[in-house]
Amino acid sequence: MPRIVVRIGKAVILIVVVVGALGGALAYAMSRHFNTAPPHADYPKPASDLEAQRQDLGYFRKLIALDRSYEPAARMEAERRIAALESLDKALDHPHFRVALMKILALADNGHTHLDLGNDANSRKLPVRLAVFSDGLYVMRTTDANSAVLGGRVVAIDGKPIDVVMERLAERGSTAQVAIRVHIRECFFHCAKAFIRSQLWHPEKWPDRRKISWGKYFANKIGLDPDAARKLDEMVEHDYKHNL
C-alpha cells in the first residue's frame, strides 16, 4: 500500500511539473507574440529640430509596423501621413506633432493603441480648461492670471464661431458633438474594441439575462462541495458591493 501511495504521489508531482512547464512555455510564447519588444532606438544626436522630428518619425514607423490592428488600407494611409510629415521643411511644434501622431494611431481603430507621452502626458499646455455642456462650451478651470474668464461661455475662438470650430474638430467623418450626458448605474471595465464590436448599446443584441456563479465554476474545477460553493458566491457578492 505505501508503495502505491508513493507511486501515485510521484505521478501527481510529475503531472504538475509538466503542466506547469507547458503553461509557462505557453505564457512566454504568448507574451513574445503579443508583447513584442520595441525596436532599438539607435540614432545619432540630431543637428536640428527638423532632423530630430524625422528621427522620431522613423522610429514611429518601426513601432506601428509591430501593431497588427491596422487594416491594409489604414496602414497605407498611416504610411502616407508619415511620409508627408517627413517631407516637411520645418519642424512642427510639440502639440501639433503629437496630435499628428495621435491621428495616425487612430487609424488602427484599436482602443489599446495609443500614444504614451510619459510624465509629460498631463502637463498643462493651456491656461484654461474647457468642458462641453448641452448649452455650450464653458471655462471650468483657469490659472490665477486668467481667473476673470472662469465660468464663462466660449462663443468664438480667434473670431470664428464656436460651432465652426467644433466642425473643424471633426475626425474620420465624425463631427465633434456638443455633449453626451450619461447616467451611470453600473460600470464595467472591458476592452474598448470588444465593447464596440458587441454593439452593447443596442438592446436587441443583448443575450438572455443570466447570473454567473463563481462558486459553481470553481466547484467543477477543483471539486468544492455545494456549501463551499455557496459561501464563495456570497464572498464574491459581498466584494462586488463593498470593495470595488
Image: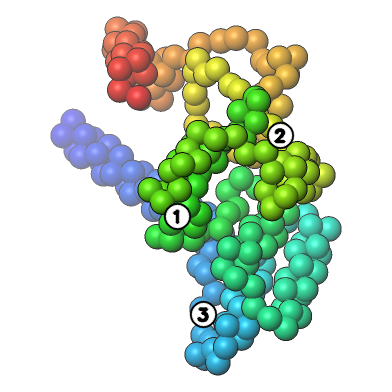
Q: In terms of sequence position, does the residue under pointer 3 or pointer 2 come before the other?
A: 3
What residue is rendered at 45% in x and 55% in y?
124
Residue under numbered circle 2: 177
Residue 31 appears anywhere in the view: no
Q: Amino acid at mark 1?
A: Arg
Is residue 131 positioned above or below 202 on the image?
Answer: below
Q: Are marks 2 and 1 in contact (CB under 8 Å)?
A: no
> What element does badge 3 sit on?
loop
Residue placed most toward the observer, 60 or 94: 94
Q: Nearer the viewer, mark 1 or mark 3?
A: 1
Residue placed most toward the observer, 209 or 215: 209
Task: Give the percent coordinates (x, y) of residue 146.
Answer: 45, 48
Q: Please tell me how many numbered marks the rendered image carries.
A: 3
For this view, does 88 lie left or right of residue 237? Answer: right
Q: Are marks 1 and 3 in contact (CB under 8 Å)?
A: no
Q: Nearer the viewer, mark 3 or mark 2?
A: 2
Gap in Å between the C-alphas at discs 1 and 3?
A: 28 Å
Residue under numbered circle 3: 41
Q: Amino acid at mark 2?
A: Gln
Task: Give the percent coordinates (x, y) of residue 46.
Answer: 54, 89
Residue under numbered circle 1: 124
For this view, does 183 lie left or right of residue 24? Answer: right
Q: Residues within 10 Å of mark 3 (few under 14, many from 20)?
A: few
Gap in Å between the C-alphas at discs 2 and 1?
A: 24 Å
